[in-house]
Image (spheres, helix red, strand yellow):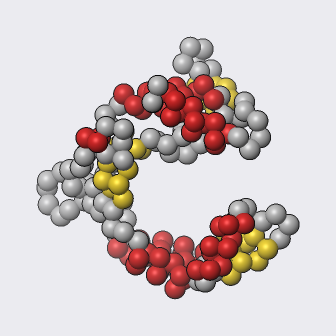
Amino acid sequence: MRRIVKNGITGSAGFGLKAFSKDDLDSIHYATLQILGQTGIKVLNEDAMEIFHGAGAFVERFNGYAIVKIPSHVVEESIRLSPGNGIFHARNPKDTFVAEPNRVGFTTFGACPNVIDPFTRKARRGTLEDTAGFARVCDYLDEIAVTERSVLAPDVPDGMMFVLSINLCLHQLYP
């Protein structure tokens, strides 16, 4: 199991980054609570709407979606009940990553619609093949603790992009 060196502690040991003060973080937190409670979020999945409603959120349904407004007490209780760490299991148990407070791990993220073609050096739309290629590259990089789908694959049928992307990544990593 990989446990990244503890960071962010007071002292001169390790690598740390303190971009925000406690007051800054509190301001961001309270602004987030205000947005979640007053503006809400758009939810497209019926099951997710029911889960939010069951947890105490206000669900306003429209044609095919809902605006979900989450009261601050629901958010605060969810934070209080959340575990202090998360485990990202790897194919090889020695590479399993433990995410916990004051530890830093690097990950891929997002879903980039465009890539720089490695052969032509020109920007173009991503493909399912690019998704697999990024998975292979990340698999070889010890510095990447967790890999997520990095490239969108609009060359697959509607509604299948996520399923096929994950399936292809798994096939590349588990031949």
Left of 110 or right of it: where is 49?
Answer: right
Question: Does 92 sit above or below residue 115?
Answer: below
Task: Work out whether residue 31 or residue 50 is closer to the camera in this orientation and state it.
Answer: 50
| Residue 106 appears in view | no
Image location of residue 66, percent across then percent down: 75, 70
User: Considering depth in this image, is 78 or 24 the residue closer to the camera?
Assistant: 78
Taking the view exactly as shown, the residue that stands out farthest to the front is 175
Image position, residue 139 (x, y; %)? 40, 31
Q: Residue at the spot x=59%, y=42% of the render?
A: 111
The number of discs equals: 0
Choose between 100 and 83: the one closer to the eye. 83
Q: Can residue 61 be seen in this view?
A: yes
Residue closest to the far top: 119
- Position of 14 with respect to 173 (left or right) is left
Q: Is residue 8 left or right of residue 119?
A: left
**x and y percent of residue 39 in the render?**
68, 75
Tell me residue 27's x, y (percent).
Answer: 46, 75
Location of residue 129 with respect to 143 vertically, above or below: above
Q: In this view, does 118 lie above or below 170?
A: above
Does residue 103 sit above or below 114 in this rendering? below
Residue 162 occupies which quadrant of the picture? top right
- Which residue is farthest left? 12
Q: Which residue is drawn at 49% across and 27% down?
A: 172
Residue drawn at point x = 31 percent, y = 37 percent: 92
